[in-house]
Image (cartoon, helix red, strand yellow):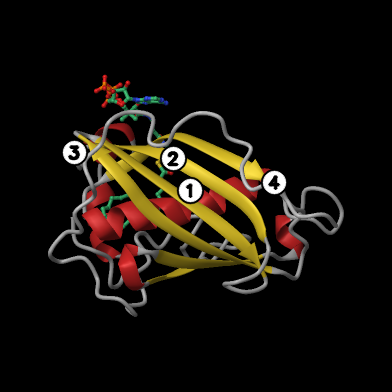
Amino acid sequence: MSEAPRSRRSTPWPPVDTESPAPHPDAPRPGTKLAVHYDQCFGCGDVEGGLHMRSTMGEHALVHSQFAVTEAHQGAPGLAHGGLLACAFDEALGSAVGNLLRRPAVTGKLETDFLRPVPVGSTLFITAKVDGVAGRKLYASAEGRLGAEDGSVAVRARALFVEVGFEHFTTHGDPDALTKFRQTPDQINP
Ligand SMILES: CCCCC/C=C\C/C=C\C/C=C\C/C=C\CCCC(=O)SCCNC(=O)CCNC(=O)[C@H](O)C(C)(C)COP(=O)(O)OP(=O)(O)OC[C@H]1O[C@@H](n2cnc3c(N)ncnc32)[C@H](O)[C@@H]1OP(=O)(O)O
């Protein structure tokens, strides 16, 4: 297979002027295995058919996540579903934003470039970083490599997260959201 294009993007990133993301003083140290943020999360929780992703804080404010693609994640025969790949990147990007900045945020916009097929049985090694901050707008990007940290780039993604108050989750989701976040072992306390 020929090399995937380095980039298919034409718009600048971040799309607005931003400040450099200053990691929170309590951001996990490099090498820390990151906590599940909610045990019913489809991305990282212990959910049947979920993605069961695990993430680790790396050097240089990078967050490393792995997504092991199983038969439960197929779109075409033998290949990962693109929507689930997008989900994996939402999780990896959200983990970078949440853990580095420790600011509660939701995904406002998520873009994905699918550059190579991702087969069942493969593991996608995703590296995510926060690119810039503009008030409540938090910009992050990631790339996913096949089979190893230095494998071929199969997927790239970038996202805008918007900072919200914790009442976002209780008002729009579950009134007991804060209790449920806290009940998740090791999660960062809201
Ligand atoms: C889940 C996290 C729990 C928190 C725990 C905290 C720490 C835990 C640590 C780690 C966490 C680890 C992992 C997390 C992993 C995964 C996370 C999954 C995340 C999700 O799965 S999350 C679900 C999907 N997500 C939604 O369910 C959002 C629905 N949505 C809304 O709730 C509103 O839409 C909202 C709040 C986004 C904005 O609403 P709003 O009224 O507050 O603010 P407003 O509209 O003014 O936007 C403010 C500025 O963002 C610009 N802006 C907004 N959207 C834009 C877009 N699409 N494109 C371009 N710009 C956009 C505006 O243009 C404006 O820009 P400006 O200020 O310059 O005018």
Alpha carbon separation for disc pair 2 and 4: 20 Å
According to the picture, the residue beneath numbered tag 2 turns out to be 159
Looking at the rendering, the quadrant in which ligand 1 lies is: top left
> Residue at image x 62%, y 74%?
148
Q: Secondary structure at mark 1?
A: helix
Which residue occupies the extreme bottom position in the image? Answer: 31
The CA span between labels 4 and 1 is: 22 Å
Callout in the foreground (2, 4): 4
Quadrant location of the C terminus? Answer: bottom left
Instruction: Give the structural element (helix, strand or loop) at label 4.
Output: loop
21 versus 186 height, above or below: above
Q: Residues within 10 Å of mark 2 (few under 14, many from 20)?
A: many
> Can you identify the residue that label 4 sits on?
5
Q: Secondary structure at mark 2?
A: strand
User: Marks 3 and 1: which is nearer the front?
Assistant: 1
- Label whose residue precedes the other's in the sequence (4 or 3): 4
Tag 1 and tag 2, C-beta contact below 8 Å: yes
Amino acid type of the residue that numbered disc 1 sits on in the rendered structure: Asp
Q: Which mark is residue 165?
A: 3
Residue at horizontal 25 percent and vertical 40 percent from the top = 133
Residue type at numbered disc 3: Gly
Question: Which mark identifies residue 90?
Answer: 1
Identify the mark at residue 57; answer none if there is no mark: none
